[in-house]
Amino acid sequence: MAEATVPVPLQAFIDATNAADSEAFVAAFTEDAVLDDWGRVFHGRPGVASWNLTDNIGKQAHFEIVDVRPGDRPDSVVATLTVTGNGFNGTGPMTFTFDGDRIARLVISPTD
C-alpha cells in the first residue's frame, strides 16, 4: 500500500497535542466527532475534551509519526504513532476519518 501524505487535520491533532494546546486540539474535531479509544467511546467535542484531559494533554502526551497509510475509505488514513508521556507509552495504529479539515472519527486500537 502506498504511503499517504499527512492530512492537515492529522497534523493539527499532533501539533496541538505536542504544544499542550487543548483549545486547538478540540478544534481539530468536528462538533459531532466520535473518539473510540480501545472501546471507550467519546461523543462530540465535549467528549473529545474529556478524553484529552484524562488520556492526552492531561497526561503530557507527545506524538511522533511512524507511518501514515490510506484507510479503507477515501476520507481516512491509518496513522501509526509513537506516544510518550505520563499515560500510555508505545506505538500503535490510529484510524482517522475526516470531514473536510476536521477529524470526524478517531479509532485507537491495539496492535495485532
Image (cartoon, grey):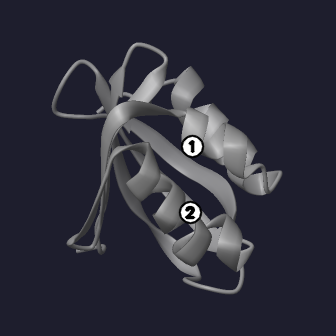
Where does residue 92 sit, x and y in percent of width and height?
43, 67
Residue 31 visible in image: yes
Question: Horizontally, is 85 left or right of 68 in the view?
Answer: right
Q: Residue at x 38, y 59 (%)?
A: 93
Label 1: how many Cα within 10 Å (few below 14, some 14–19, many 20+):
many
Labels 1 and 2: the sequence-earlier one: 1
Q: Quadrant of residue 15?
A: top right
Give the residue type at disc 1: Val
Q: Secondary structure at mark 1?
A: helix
Q: Secondary structure at mark 2?
A: helix
Where does residue 74 sit, x and y in percent of width and height?
23, 18
- Disc on res. 52: 2
- Is the C-beta separation of discs 1 and 2 under 8 Å? yes
- Tell me how far mark 1 sits from mark 2, CA to CA: 8 Å
Q: Which residue is mark 1?
A: 26
Q: Nearer the viewer, residue 47 or 66?
A: 47
Q: Residue at x 46, y 40 (%)?
A: 68
Question: Horizontally, is 37 left or right of 20 in the view?
Answer: left
Q: Residue at x 51, y 46 (%)?
A: 67
